[in-house]
Amino acid sequence: MQGQESNIVFLPVEDAARREVSALWDTLRLEANAAVHRDTALARAMNSAVLMHAGFGHALSHRLAIKLADHDIDRDELLALIHGAYMDRPGLLGAAAADLQAVKDRDPSNAEVLTPFLYFKGFSALQGYRIAHWLWANGRKHLARHIQSRISEAFGIDIHPAAVVGRGVMLDHGSGLVIGETAVVEDEVSILQNVTLGGTGKETGDRHPKVRRGVLIGAGAKILGNIEIGIGAKVGAGSVVVSPVAPYSSVVGVPARTVGRRHTALPGVTMDQSVSEPEYII
């Protein structure tokens, strides 16, 4: 297994993305070594997950293959498949690095990249989706559906392979998250658990929400239909949204209504979950 991984050569990526991935990989290795230094019982785990690998792409491929393998497609087959995706689309690694950095920057319970890389199912599910999306785009739809199904079984997160998801996205906890076929989630969005980006049950074709950059979606929110959630918007926990949401505004309730004053920040980045007039925490 180790010999097989060491023979994989990844294609070059754009300079900025390559630097991003390289810097993150250096940090990941430092944190893994520090974990072993603090607790030697972790030596085998850190070696298998991080330290034995030649780079971030190798380590991430190995991690996903372990988590998503089953009796239909085993670990070695998945490892080769994921390697193939990263060789064909090196930008997938840049997106993964941006996602991992987003978790470190936004999650107050976590101050490193090692923990979400190893244990956070929102991060793992999102990277599995990226592989399924690559398969879907290349016409391998049944295999994409297989990956989608395994992500749902392993993590309790269901993202259709045809959905479009940007970079620097955080799926916090992720449990119960559903993202439909024609949904779009742009860069720097943060989504908490038990959220649905779904259809209304009546339409066909383009029928799912378009979530613009920097949006924050609170736990349990349901956003239904081909509607736009504008850049920098906040959607309150438990809200049911069936109408478009203006940029930099906050909506809460069932059905959702606009509350508070317009803001200017990107709450998906700042994780500011408060609104004023009336006071409300999403």
Image (cartoon, helix red, strand yellow):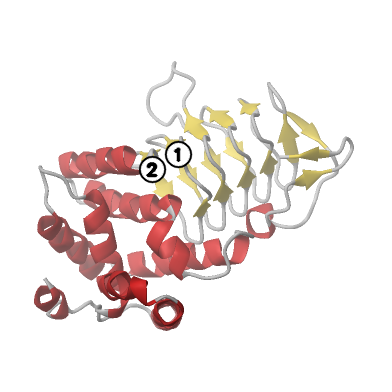
Q: Position of residue 263 (x, y in %)?
A: 80, 51
Which residue occupies 46% across, 78% down?
38
Which residue occupies 12% across, 80% down?
7
Q: Position of residue 222 (x, y in %)?
A: 56, 29
Q: Is residue 88 left or right of residue 22?
A: left
Q: Which residue is mark 1?
A: 183
Give the number of marks: 2
CA neighbours of label 1 inside 10 A, class few (<14), some (14 to 19), many (20+): many
Q: Is residue 95 above or below residue 192?
A: below
Q: Quadrant of the N terminus?
A: bottom left
Label 2 is placed on what type of residue?
Ala
Q: Is residue 17 left or right of residue 78?
A: right
Which residue occupies 53% across, 70% down?
112
Residue most extreme to the right: 277
Q: Position of residue 264 (x, y in %)?
A: 78, 56
Which residue occupies 23% across, 65% down?
62
Q: Which residue is mark 2?
A: 163
Q: Quadrant of the C terminus?
A: top right
Looking at the rendered structure, the secondary structure element under dot 2 is loop
Q: Is residue 3 above or below residue 266?
A: below
Looking at the rendered structure, the secondary structure element under dot 1 is loop
Distance (Cα) linking label 2 and label 1: 5 Å
Q: Considering only order in the chain, which callout, 1 or 2, is on the residue closer to the N terminus?
A: 2
Q: Is residue 139 above or below residue 205?
A: below
Label 1 is placed on what type of residue?
Ala
Front residue of 113 and 136: 113
Front residue of 155 and 212: 155
Residue 105: quadrant of the picture: bottom right
**Is there CB contact under 8 Å for labels 2 and 1?**
yes
Residue most extreme to the top: 202
Front residue of 38 and 188: 38
Q: Position of residue 84 (x, y in %)?
A: 17, 64
